[in-house]
Structures are given as C-alpha cells and as structure tokens.
Amino acid sequence: MTAYLEIADDSKGHELSLFCVPKHYEEDLDSVIIPSGLIKDRNLLTDIFGMASASFNECINVKTLCRTERLARDIVRDMGGHHIVALCVLKGGYKFFADLMDFIKTLNQNSDKSVPLTVDFIRLKSYSNDQSTNCVKVIGGDELSALTGKNVLIVEDIVETGRTMETLLKLLNECHPKMVKVVSLLVKRTPRSSGYRPDYIGFEVPDKFLVGYALDYNEYFRDLSHICILSDRAKEKYKV
C-alpha cells in the first residue's frame, strides 16, 4: 500500500466562507474538509512519498505534488509497461477518474515509463439515504467477462465498509483477470469496516458523511468542487 494523507477524527474542516460554495448549498454543509486544490492543485501539498501516512495539518500549507498526481505516479511506477483497463466506478468516481487519467496521460507523454490505457465504466449501488446497506447492486456486471486476462485498475471515489469493493472484486475474479489493483480517493475510518484496504489511497477520512467532488447524497451535491461534511439538517431535507 502506498502513502496517503490522514485527516484526524477531530478535524472540523474549514469555514465555508473561505471558499466558493453554491448559494443553494450554503445551509446544507457544516464545513469544507478537503478543498479541491488539495486533491488536484500541485501547489498545495507536501511530498510524502515513502511515508506510511502524514498528518493533514502538517501537509496543507507545504508546496509540492497534489494527491492525484502522486497516485498517478505510483500507479505508473507499479503498472508501467502493462496494458491497463481503467475501470471507473460510477457515479461518484467520475471526477477523480477524469483527473487521475489526465495525470497519467501527462506522465505518459513526459517520462520513460508509460502505461497504455483503455477505459471502461461500471455502476455500484449500496446506499439508502446516508446508510450503507448489505445489498450491493452491480449495474453493468455482465460486461466484466470482457476483462478476462486483462490488467485492471479499479478507480473508486470512497471505500467505507469495504463490502461493496469486496463484492466487485469477487465478481471480477470470477472472470479471471491477469491483475487487479484498486485506487480510491478516500477511505473512511469506521467501526463498520470489513478491514479491506485499497492498493492506493488518497486520503483517510473520519467517519462522517461527505459530499462534493462528485460524491452525492441522493444525487445532490455532485456539483460541489470541494469535499464537504454534510449537515444533519441536509440529511433530512434531501431524504427520500
């Protein structure tokens, strides 16, 4: 497992007034926990390569690589030379997937080691309002057979209990891929965790309900640029 950034359980995030947040969401969010610049702006992060983890507060004010670029470099380092099928988990993973692919393409153009890429998409559903269920619905699973003998990189937005990813990996392994790696932008620390950990992690986050950067609550908040903590009031407001 590669390096990641750990956001402490007692982190209250950043005041909404410091960021550009859509007016229609201002009353629905408690704070910004991960600014979009911390995900993809190369001027906001510390270089933590070679460390097991790093404190969020230690990293946020130091200038160096962004997390997504760091993950792209690690993936190219480990999987370079192999033809990779990048499998995006929709819908929440699309923003992270697009940014990660852009960084890998840039590395392909500017380094000696490159990764031939093709892309595919799958949709998983395991949530009812703010609660993860024990029922994982896979949409597009019939097409997994096309991944037989392939090197697969699964790109996910967040791993919470880990059961959704374990279900997908079980289905995928039945199709006998050559190699499977998983990269997740977020991993949540929760007592409900099965213990599963992805191969590549961007941030380890507290057990709070997060939205933004394509993460949603009943399809709302995907249009937020930053990753934010959802308020209890908003959970009731947008409940289905």
Image (cartoon, helix red, strand yellow):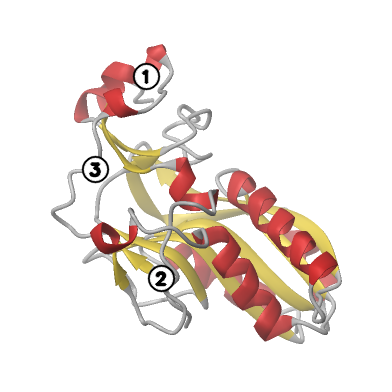
Element type at mark 1:
helix
> How far across and down, in percent of the image, does residue 201 sit?
47, 69
What is the number of the mark on residue 122? none
Q: Closer to the camera: disc 1 or disc 2? A: 2
Q: Amino acid at mark 3?
A: Gly
Q: Residue at x 79, y 61 (%)?
A: 105
Among all residues in the image, which is located at the extreme top? 23
Q: Is residue 146 visible?
A: yes
Q: Secondary structure at mark 2?
A: loop
Return the residue at label 2: 4
Q: How far from the left and from the top, in percent, is residue 108?
A: 81, 69
Q: Is residue 113 above or below residue 142?
A: below
Instruction: Write down the quadrant of residue 226 in the picture.
Output: top left
Task: Residue under label 3, please give it.
Answer: 13
Residue 191 placed where, x, y %? 21, 66
Q: Which kind of residue does numbered mark 2 sit on?
A: Tyr
Q: Secondary structure at mark 3?
A: loop
Residue at 42%, 23% in the rendered image: 20
Q: Amino acid at mark 1?
A: Tyr
